[in-house]
Each structure stands twice: as structure tokens, then as C-alpha cells.
Image: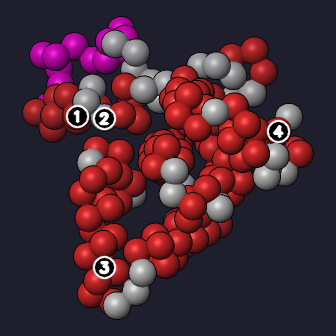
Amino acid sequence: SILARVLLQNQVFFFQMLNTIASNSQKQVAEVCGDYLDNWLEHCETDAQSTVDKKLNTMAMLSLINTNSGVVLERFASILSIVVEALHSVCGLGEDSHLDRLWLNGDTADLPDDSQETEHEKRKRQLSRQDPVHTLNLRDYVIQELMTYQRAHGQSALNALMNTLDPKISE
């Protein structure tokens, strides 16, 4: 969760950290990155997570596809499987599937009156208004990241990645 936040907030620092780990362990950066992604994907698939953690991990993993790293793209199908699961958890199914239940969208109607809030609650609310988990709609973010990849690498490259998906996910 902490590394997911680091990745979302500062991708350059994240990759510098991977370089340092690789250097210290005398491994290739691709190997360290691959090991990290494999552990992360396994954690996301097997461990129970809160909806907030699912969304956070999904956004962070998805942000990696536009690095065009072979290590990341090899795991595209697994990453998109996590994305689909998070979309179902965060946005639900059916008519309201486009609504992200964690997205604040500037809506303050459900927030308590400032005079009744404790200082801790005020800080939490202020942090939520800056947190990508609450300021970005997951469905829109997924579409944006895939479109960014398409613009950078072309429709055929995106199609090649999409062809690696399990047919159930493609639906």
C-alpha cells in the first residue's frame, strides 16, 4: 500500500528505489521489478483488501503500463484481471457500474458540519480531498491509462496486449 502510493505520487522515485535495490542485491532492475510485481499481484489476488486498497493498488499497477516496460507488459493480463476485480468492487455491476463509490467528485453534501468535527476528522477529510483514491474516478482512470498507451504505441500494440487477456475479462 505504501509503495502503491509512492508509485502513484512519484514514479521516478519508485524506479530509483528499484535501481537501488537491484544494485544492492546485485540483480538486474528487470528482475527486481518482476519479483516485486509478481509478489504484488499475488498479494492482490489472494489477500482480502479493503475497497480503498483495491482501488489504490489498481491505479498504481495500471500506471505502470505506460512505462512500456517489458517486465510490466508481460504481466498485463494479470494486471487487468486485478483492474476488473477492483472495478467490480469499487463501481459495482449493473446500471450504476460507472459510479465510483470512493470518488468524492467535489461533493461535500455527505460530510459533517465543520463545527461538529474533531481535528482528526478534519485532517482526514482534507487528506481525502488530495488522495487520488478519492479524487479520481476509477473507471475514467482505467480508460485514460489505456488510451494513453494507445496514443503512445498505437492501436495494434494495444490490441496485442488485449489479446493476452482471458476471454472472460475481455467481455
**Residue 88 on image: x %, y %:** 69, 36
**Residue 89 on image: x %, y %:** 64, 39
| Looking at the image, residue 14 lies above or below residue 101 | below
Q: Which amino acid type is shown beneath numbered disc 2?
A: Asp
Q: Would you name the residue on which mark 2 appears? A: 131
Q: Which amino acid type is shown beneath numbered disc 4?
A: Ser
Q: Are marks 3 and 4 in contact (CB under 8 Å)?
A: no
2 or 3: tag closer to the N-terminus? 3
Q: Which stretch appears magenta?
A: 107-118
Q: Would you name the residue on which mark 3 appears? A: 21
How much space separates mark 3 and mark 4, taking CA atoms? Answer: 35 Å
| Looking at the image, residue 29 lies above or below residue 48 | below
3 or 1: tag closer to the N-terminus? 3
- In the rendered image, the residue lying farthest to the right is 167
Crowding at mark 4 (Cα within 10 Å: few <14, some 14-19, many 20+): few
Q: In the picture, residue 124 is in which quadrant?
A: top left
Q: Would you name the residue on which mark 4 appears? A: 170
**Residue 49 versus residue 113: which sits nearer the camera?**
49
Residue at x 39% of width, y 29% of height? 134
**Residue 141 on image: x %, y %:** 51, 29
Q: Indicate left or right for 14 with 118 as reference.
A: right
Crowding at mark 3 (Cα within 10 Å: few <14, some 14-19, many 20+): some
Q: Quadrant of the N terminus?
A: bottom left
How much space separates mark 2 and mark 4, taking CA atoms? Answer: 29 Å
3 or 4: tag closer to the N-terminus? 3
Q: Would you name the residue on which mark 1 appears? A: 127
